[in-house]
Amino acid sequence: MDNERIAIITGASRGLGLALAAGLAREGWRLVIDARDGEALAEAAWGLPGQPAVIAGDVTDPGHRAALVEAATRAGGPDLLINNAGILGPTPLPALAEYPLAVLREVYEVNVFGPLALAQLALPALRGRGGTIVNVTSDAAVEPYPGWGGYGSAKAAVEQLGRVLAVEEPAVRVWTVDPGDLRTRMHQEAFPGEDISDRPLPETVVPAFLKLLAERPPSGRVRL
């Protein structure tokens, strides 16, 4: 048990989160996974090796965040926190001049405050285990694409939080990971009615992610 590696992965019912969960499970990691849709999460967990702890809920809920860290702690960890859960915001993507501010607050709650709050809870264990925080980001955080002001600015905030956290927490690796454009439901929502079949599937970036974990470069931004 003491040699097992334990990972918390948010947003693991589909897309990149599920692909990373499957890849880590095949490598022998024990998983604590979440998603807002409990039925979809349970179905996804059936296809994963091992017996992941499945905890449905929203990362904006303090009680849910505490349950994730408690489950990982009971398993002996956590060693790795992957902040993958996120929301795109309204679609079609609105210009900032018309962006509904109430929705923008929700985008920030899910994409910025939730990941930071979860990291705060996990950090005591991560420090002692030489652990890792992965914040999933996007090129929309660094490029000014029309319509991406809400989601992109939230991811930009996450990237800066990661940079500061990395210098404040030298015992922990903090990687901001940009997987590129992938064929996911969120990406399809960003381009309603368009064919995104030319984008690679999430599973294609898993080998690069596993290599990242094996090589453990310094904290920073990583493009898979």
Image: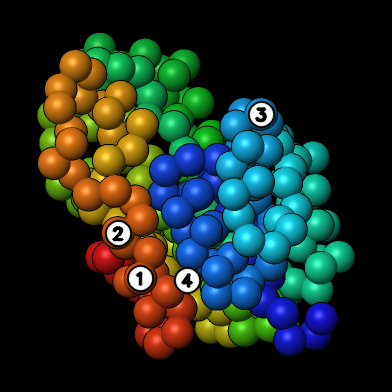
How far apart, in angstroms, are the residues tagged by discs 4 and 1?
A: 19 Å
Q: Earlier in the sequence, mark 4 or mark 2?
A: 4
Instruction: Kindly identify the amino acid type of the residue bearing the numbered disc 3.
Output: Glu
Report if residue 103 is visible in the image: yes
How far apart, in angstroms, are the residues tagged by discs 4 and 2?
A: 22 Å
Rendered position, 170 above or below 90: below
Instruction: Kindly identify the amino acid type of the residue bearing the numbered disc 4.
Output: Val
Do the residues under discs 4 and 2 have CB atoms within 8 angstroms? no
Task: Give the labeled residue for mark 2.
Answer: 204
Label 2 element class: helix
How far apart, in angstroms, are the residues tagged by discs 2 and 1?
A: 7 Å
Do the residues under discs 2 and 3 have CB atoms within 8 angstroms? no
Instruction: Kindly identify the amino acid type of the residue bearing the numbered disc 2.
Output: Thr
Q: Earlier in the sequence, mark 3 or mark 4?
A: 3
Q: Where residue 174 is drawn, which disc sits there?
A: 4
Indicate which label's residue lies in the foreground, 4 or 2: 2
Label 3 neighbourhood size at 10 Å, few (<14), some (14-19), many (20+)? few
Label 1 element class: helix
How far apart, in angstroms, are the residues tagged by discs 3 and 4?
A: 31 Å
Quarter of the image with the N terminus is: bottom right
Q: Earlier in the sequence, mark 4 or mark 1?
A: 4
Task: Give the labeled residue for mark 1.
Answer: 207
Q: Earlier in the sequence, mark 3 or mark 1?
A: 3
Instruction: Kindly identify the amino acid type of the residue bearing the numbered disc 1.
Output: Pro
Q: Where residue 39 is drawn, which disc sits there?
A: 3
Chosen colour scheme: rainbow
How far apart, in angstroms, are the residues tagged by discs 3 and 1?
A: 28 Å
Indicate which label's residue lies in the foreground, 3 or 4: 3
Do the residues under discs 3 and 4 have CB atoms within 8 angstroms? no
In the rendered image, residue 138, in percent from the top left (x then y), is placed at 29, 49
Q: Nearer the viewer, residue 216 or 54?
A: 54
Do the residues under discs 2 and 1 have CB atoms within 8 angstroms? yes
